[in-house]
Image: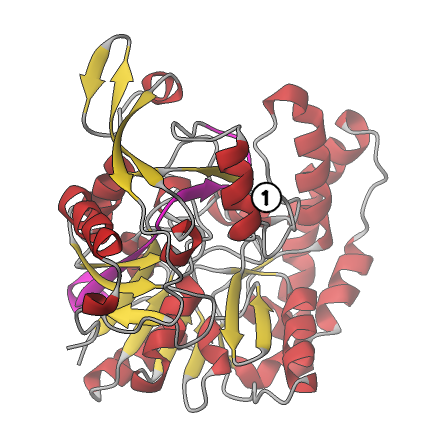
């Protein structure tokens, strides 16, 4: 049975939660394998809207086991806040599993994230200030705190002492902040230990055994390809691997067990934070897409930058991730437009470039080359079959498919759970 990876194929906020929810009644496990509470999924079920930040969106589907695996950094306070909010709305959260090897975001990570970003001034990256980057930095520097450390106070105290030895010098001498004491960090983390203990597991073992037993496991990536720390628009990226390769390292499931990679793309493009964005719009078209698409961050509430569909980016994502299927979301946001531009290539220093430039400088200066497509100017939110879409909408989808490097297997036509057109099965 398949292990399926869902990844964002642009700069995030493409609607990965909707794709996960589409598969929900057919899958057994949903795994968050990277990132922290610096991104979110919005899932609409009937009249209810759920904004998830740290939890896998599979937690909303009865019978699915949601897993936070080792590649995630966890703010435990945020975790319990989300769990309590869902419980208050009648959602069963008892199935959640948390990796013993996942790293913990502490108070000092959040503090350092915020003061460092302010210190950068005009060179700010656009971090959410939630401590994700500093937590990953500690992981790589081998001074991180893991979930399992909360169950051994002596080990926890030693690790916190080691981390604060350096960080307090930075906070006091560079940023003019007060020193953080070991006791306050240890007490804060230990306060969650017993509540957390029943959820903690060897999730790599659990997932491999599930696959051995013929279960369907879905790996749900946070952020997106263009925010991947290795393959994105560095340094304007997240601090983890948001591409399909991250599903293997971030979960302990070998890459040869991953059967399908589903890339999520919007029918236009958005991003949050600083960094290059060739198709970005600064006119009334941008205002229209932002307003109709409600393009504001699920986690931060920040207005998203918006632009037209970028086919070279989709091709890049298909190549880097090994995308087998695309899910095209928010096609309905284009319903009112008479014409729809699509970026088919770039011009860099007077030369046409058909792929994403390897040089960040070239990408920053890339000017989009557009092809115009006629709009359909009809409401498609009630359509459920591809052949029932207006002819111009069908042609738009087929044109994007031809440009983007893989087939478009499903199309989102509205915010509702069932507002989707399926062209090809995403599991079989």
Residue for point 63% across, 78% down: 83
Identify the secondary structure beneath mark 1. Answer: helix
Q: Position of residue 53 (x, y in %)?
A: 57, 63
The residue located at (54%, 82%) in the rendering is 199
- Identify the residue at the far top of this view: 350
- Indicate the quadrant where residue 120 lies: top right
Is residue 201 among the parts visible in the rendering? no
The segment highlighted magenta reads: 254-275
Quarter of the picture holding the C terminus: bottom left
- The residue under label 1 is 134
Picture coordinates of residue 298 (x, y %)?
59, 57
Q: Is residue 155 visible?
A: yes
The image position of residue 421, as x and y in percent, is 28, 69
Q: How many marks?
A: 1
Residue 271 is a magenta residue: yes
Q: Residues within 10 Å of mark 1 (few under 14, many from 20)?
A: many
| Residue sitting nearer the eye, 167 or 410 | 410
Please, is residue 301 above or below residue 232 in the view?
below
**Residue 254 relative to residue 82: left or right:** left
Left or right of 136, for residue 164: right
14 lies left or right of 130 = left
Q: Quadrant of the N terminus?
A: bottom left
Residue 194 image offset from top left, x and y in percent: 67, 82
């Amino acid at each position: 049975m398949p292990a399926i990876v869902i990844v964002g194929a642009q700069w995030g906020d493409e609607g990965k939660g909707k794709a996960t929810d589409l598969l929900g009644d057919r899958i057994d496990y949903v795994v968050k394998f990277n990132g922290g509470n610096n991104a979110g999924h919005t899932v609409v079920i009937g009249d209810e809207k759920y904004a998830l930040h740290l939890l896998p969106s599979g937690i909303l589907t009865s019978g699915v086991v949601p897993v936070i695996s080792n590649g995630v950094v966890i703010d435990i306070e945020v975790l319990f806040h989300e769990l309590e909010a869902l419980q208050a709305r009648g959602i069963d959260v008892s199935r959640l599993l948390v990796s013993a090897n996942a790293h913990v975001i502490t108070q000092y990570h959040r503090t350092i994230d915020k003061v460092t970003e302010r210190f950068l001034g005009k060179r700010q990256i656009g971090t959410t200030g939630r401590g994700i980057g500093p937590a990953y930095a500690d992981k790589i520097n081998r001074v991180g705190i893991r979930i399992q450390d909360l169950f051994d106070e002596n080990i926890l105290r030693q690790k916190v002492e080691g981390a604060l030895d350096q960080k307090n010098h930075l906070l006091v001498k560079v940023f003019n902040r007060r020193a953080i004491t070991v006791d306050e960090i240890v007490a804060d983390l230990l306060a969650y230990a017993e509540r957390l203990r029943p959820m903690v597991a060897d999730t790599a073992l659990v997932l491999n055994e599930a696959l051995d037993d013929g279960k369907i496991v879905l790996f749900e990536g946070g952020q997106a390809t263009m925010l991947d720390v290795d393959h994105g628009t560095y340094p304007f990226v997240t601090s983890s691997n948001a591409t399909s390769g991250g599903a293997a390292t971030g979960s302990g499931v070998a890459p040869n067990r991953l059967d399908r990679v589903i890339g999520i793309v919007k029918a236009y493009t958005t991003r949050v934070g600083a960094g290059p964005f060739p198709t970005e719009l600064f006119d009334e078209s941008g205002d229209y897409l932002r307003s109709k698409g409600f393009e504001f961050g699920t986690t931060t509430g920040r207005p998203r930058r918006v632009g037209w569909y970028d086919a070279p980016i989709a091709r890049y994502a298909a190549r880097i991730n090994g995308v087998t299927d695309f899910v095209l979301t928010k096609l309905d946001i284009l319903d009112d437009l008479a014409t729809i531009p699509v970026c088919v290539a770039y011009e860099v220093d007077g030369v046409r470039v058909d792929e994403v430039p390897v040089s960040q400088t070239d990408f920053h200066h890339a000017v989009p080359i557009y092809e115009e497509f006629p709009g359909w100017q009809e409401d498609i939110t009630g359509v459920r079959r591809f052949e029932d879409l207006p002819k111009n909408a069908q042609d738009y989808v087929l044109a994007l498919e031809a440009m983007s490097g893989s087939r478009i297997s499903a199309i989102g036509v509205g915010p509702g759970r069932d507002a989707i057109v399926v062209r090809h099965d995403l599991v079989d």
